[in-house]
Each structure stands twice: as structure tokens, then as C-alpha cells.
Amino acid sequence: MASQLVLAGPPECPERPFCLEGLTGTYGITFKDFKATDAGGPITIEALENGDAQVGLLFTSDPAIAAKGFVLLEDDKQLQLADNIIPVVREDVLAGNPVIEEALNGVIAKLSQAALTDLNKQVTVDGKAAAEVAAAWIAAEGLSFSGGSGSVTVGSTNFYEQEIIGEVFAQVLEGAGIDVERKFQLGAREVVFPALESGEIDILAEYAATALEYVNNKAGEASTDPAATSDKLRERLADKGLTALDFAAATDQNGFVVTKATADRYGLAKLSDLAKPAP
């Protein structure tokens, strides 16, 4: 199938394991051609929309997927490292308030890929406030918890998606009876992880593989398996007084998308479909 299609992605794509090299090695996919565009940005989106390419590399939670109606092809052979959304929390906070783990894991259980992408779209494309979007999603999912007390601080890096998820965490915890302070847009991981360890913040929405490779100083322990990656992250966090809770189905990692018209024409839903013989 892919032999009839053009792939758009960053110039380094042909030599990268997450891109053409991995698609060939893991899936046996060979495209008709490769078009160098950008790293999941507007040039890739334009190439898809005008037909210069039929497959494009975007991040899996890119709001353009929802805004443009693109189809995210399932990575059914797990080519990409597991950057599933996962809460990182101070252990002493969990010990004093068990409902925090219940509530955050409740959010994570509902956070599908489509849900995360739509939350991002509503804030970054539609221009809605993160607080408004979070409240509507919490209500729609019926997320309600009780029995909490005291106070916690939810933080985020300077990435809009982490702030949106942080706002969801904050509102769910407030609904459970906990006073929540928000410290969003603190900076990079070099800022937020020391803030977690010191107790300046207590809760942070993270990405399993990226967080693991940060705390282990790029030891190469992250894998394509979200459960194994999350377990290793918990192991590496333990001596810092931190832990990671459940991981979500939602990810923010490299992904491959097609337009709905292309998906319908070729019967594409997952990456392995691209390896099927052309009709």
C-alpha cells in the first residue's frame, strides 16, 4: 500500500529509528517517495491537505489532528517509545491523602488519545480557557471523588498540554475536598523536578519515556512498552520521594497521520495497514 503513497516529515526522517528507518525495519513499509517538510508542523499539515503527501509525521496529541479531522494510525507494533501521560506525585502527599491516587488514576483511566487531542484543540485552536475546557470534560466523564482534605500544589512545565492536564487534575482534586494551588508554566524539567523533590509542587503530569530518560540521565531504559517503562520510572523515582501512578492510553509521541479521505480510500487504521499489498 505504502508504495503508492508519499510520506512527509522532518529532513532527518530517513535516518531516524522513529521515522522511515523504523517504519521499514518494524513494519516492512517502503513509500513511493519522501517529502522533507518539518517536525510535525504547519508545512507537514499543508502537504497533507494539498495532496503533496498522503502520510505525515505529527505528534500524537497535536490539536491539528482534531481540527483537521486527520486519522492517527495506530502504532500496532509499538515502534515509538512509550510517552504515555502519567502523573508524578510526591509519596508523602499520597500517604496523607489516599483519595489523591484514586482521583488522579480516575482521570488517567478516562484520558484517551482522542480526548487529549480534543482538549488541546479546544484550548489552542478554539481559544477556550483551560479551566472551562477541563470543567466540561470532567463533568462529561462523570469524574467525582470525595474524602479529601488539606492542600496540594499542582505544577506544570511551560508546555500548554501539561497545563491543561494539570488543570484537570486540580479541579478533580478540588471536587474531592482538597485545596489546590496551581503553579503552571514553571519552566523546563530542570526546574519542575527539583520543585517536586523540594515540595514546592506535589503533582505533575508527565510523559513516561521522556520522564524516565530525564531522571536516569539518558540511560536508555525507556522502551516501547508503557507498563515496563512506567515500572522503571517508579523505580528511578523512589529515592527522590516521588512515584508515578497509572499511565493513560493517551500519548504525546511521534505518530503518523492521514486525511480521512486517504484512510477511507485505502482502508487505513493502523500502521501495519500500510504494509498491505496495493489494490
Image: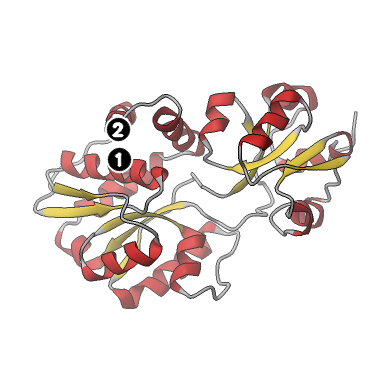
Quarter of the image that includes the C terminus:
top right
In percent of width and height, residue 150 lies at 9, 53
Crowd rating for badge 1 (residues with CA inside 10 Å; few <14, some 14–19, many 20+): many
Given the image, on which type of amino acid does mark 2 rest?
A: Ile
Residue wearing tag 1:
168
Crowd rating for badge 2 (residues with CA inside 10 Å; few <14, some 14–19, many 20+): some
Name the residue: 27% across, 33% down.
131
In percent of width and height, residue 5 lies at 83, 35
Name the secondary structure under disc 2. Answer: helix
Given the image, on which type of amino acid does mark 1 rest?
A: Val
* Residue 183: mark: none
In percent of width and height, residue 68 lies at 59, 25
Name the residue: 53% across, 38% down.
62
Q: Are marks 2 and 1 in contact (CB under 8 Å)?
A: yes
Vertical comparison of 220 with 95: above or below: below
Q: Quadrant of residue 16?
A: bottom right
Q: Quadrant of residue 86?
A: bottom left
Residue depth check, mark 2 versus mark 1: number of the one nearer the observer = 1
Q: Is residue 61 left or right of residue 23?
A: left
Alpha carbons under labels 2 and 1: distance apart: 7 Å
Quarter of the image that includes the N terminus:
top right
Residue wearing tag 2:
138
Q: Earlier in the sequence, mark 2 or mark 1?
A: 2
Name the secondary structure under disc 1. Answer: helix
Q: Quadrant of residue 220?
A: bottom right
Vertical comparison of 9 with 240: above or below: above
In percent of width and height, residue 202 lies at 24, 59
Q: Nearer the viewer, residue 50 or 148?
A: 50
Vertical comparison of 61 with 67: above or below: below
